Amino acid sequence: MLLKQKKKIEIVLIITFAIITFIGILNHSMWRDELNGWLIARDSSSFFDFFESVKYEGHPLLWYFLLWFLNKFTANPIIMQVVHWLISVATLSIFIIYAPFNTLQKVLFSFGYFPLYEYSLISRNYAFGILSIFLFCTCFQIRSRHRNYVTLAFILAFMANTNAYCLLISIALGITLFFEYCFKKYLGYTIEAKKAHIIISILILIIGVSISVFTLLPPIDSTLQGGANQWFLNFDINRLLQTVNRIWRSYIMVIIPSDSKILDLIFFSFLSIILFSCILLSFIQKPVALCFYLVGSLEIIIFTYIKFLGSQRHYGHLYIILISSLWIENSCDDVRLHKKYLENIFVRFLNSFSKITEFLVSYRKYVIGIILWLQVIAGIVAFSRDLSIPYSSSRMTANFIQQNNLDDYLIFGSEDFTIAPISGYLNKKIYYPETKKMGSYVLFNNSRQPTNDLEIISQIEKRILNQNENILLILNHELLEYSDNLDIVLLKKFMKSFIYNEKYYIYLVKPHKND
């Protein structure tokens, strides 16, 4: 009876999540990071061109292959949102059905910031990554993994090709499996996997990681996040504090310290270290889970410092690592290494240490509970905000253009990468002054040249004088330069946008007629 009731609760929870997020994703106005990948898949002239363009995105190919496939059916980007929604629902379903948490914890996680908002409403490759992580955790808890690692290896290879952060997590999980195998005697495991299967599994993981790394290596002329050469390898206390703060920002979403205030950075870095250390020590009796939590978290933290400080969707993987570590922990037996193998070394210290870890384990559930509740608050706030304030003004702008039959005009748009989502909604290429040609998706390379209003007006003036046609101009700022040879009329401006530089001004530009 209890099992049936539990199943009913799980089904209701999944359906509720699916309905709420479906409403959210239909309401969500996509921004450039979502639609640029869609545009690459839509407008690449060939598969080779598609592959070369994706390399400027800073992500592996898997998500882009899916977008390329979807474009064979329709050019309407809403299909991307629907498929992304299906991925997020599938991910949540795996968590609800298989994760070893109680019902309240499952409810709280489901409606937390990352599952409800960041990895559901915003159509990026991160949902694919979370799906693969939860698939791994599900397969890991099956004891048959000790007989065959091939399934886990395929999942890790898939994971490595979803995004850069999941590449790091796949490596951490691979190291965890290696750790488990090497120390099976001390962990009390009997691993029956054949050597041939182990070798095949290692090869699968190496191939998957290699493909991911190859596609992640940016072209020489890439300027995205400084390109291939921009790595922050010097010691900087301010950047270090900002990086450590990402632990707090990932776990505790409702109190966000400022990156520009040194006292905030110091205080919350201290709290981050305390929080991380206590959780780490609470895994001491489950070395396999401890290995993953430590290696995975350190990988993300180091990458954050040396390459990219990132946003919630990036360092949010620290939170996913925490949840996954708790999941993996449940599949591991207690191993009191310090009592079993270090019995005669620092006995008093070890006994005291044992009491500390037992204390941390006993109180960890309350800390995790607080984190989950705070995640729910952040999730509700973010989800509600997206319902009331468009994430981007791109969809409203495109709708206005179509409803007023303005899409027949030649459209100039600047700044190019902020205008790209409008191209996605219009299913129409736009002239970008930055590259001086028609386009849709934007590649961050040396062919893009920064421009200003004076240059934009100059390009429009040349076009109108040569072609004698009216032009629709879309800017993400108010036009400050005009020309005596042009009549420029502001038709509409769209100021409601969560993304600050995706607010738009629409102008109709005509050749000036002397009375």
Image (spheres, rainbow, N blue to C red):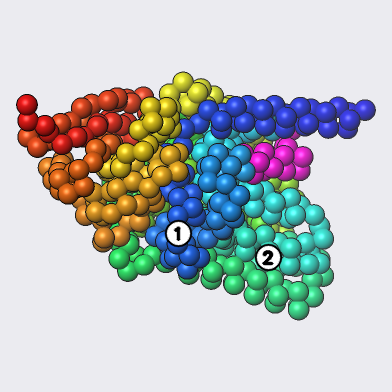
Q: Is residue 231 left or right of residue 198?
A: left
Characterize the local packing of mark 1: few (<14), some (14-19) or many (20 or more) Cα atoms within 10 angstroms.
some
Q: Residue at x 81, y 67 (%)?
A: 147
- Inspect this view and state whether residue 383 appears: yes
Q: Nearer the viewer, residue 477 or 99?
A: 477
Residue that badge 2 annotates: 153
Residue 198: percent from the left, percent from the top?
Answer: 72, 73
Alpha carbon distance from label 2 to label 1: 32 Å
Residue 246: percent from the left, percent from the top?
Answer: 42, 43
Give amino acid for label 2.
Answer: Ala
Q: Quadrant of residue 184?
A: bottom right
* SS of the residue under disc 1: loop
Q: Which residues are magenta?
A: 85-105
Vertical side of 357 occupied by 117: above or below: above
Q: Nearer the viewer, residue 470 or 448?
A: 470
- For the N terminus, which image quadrant? top right
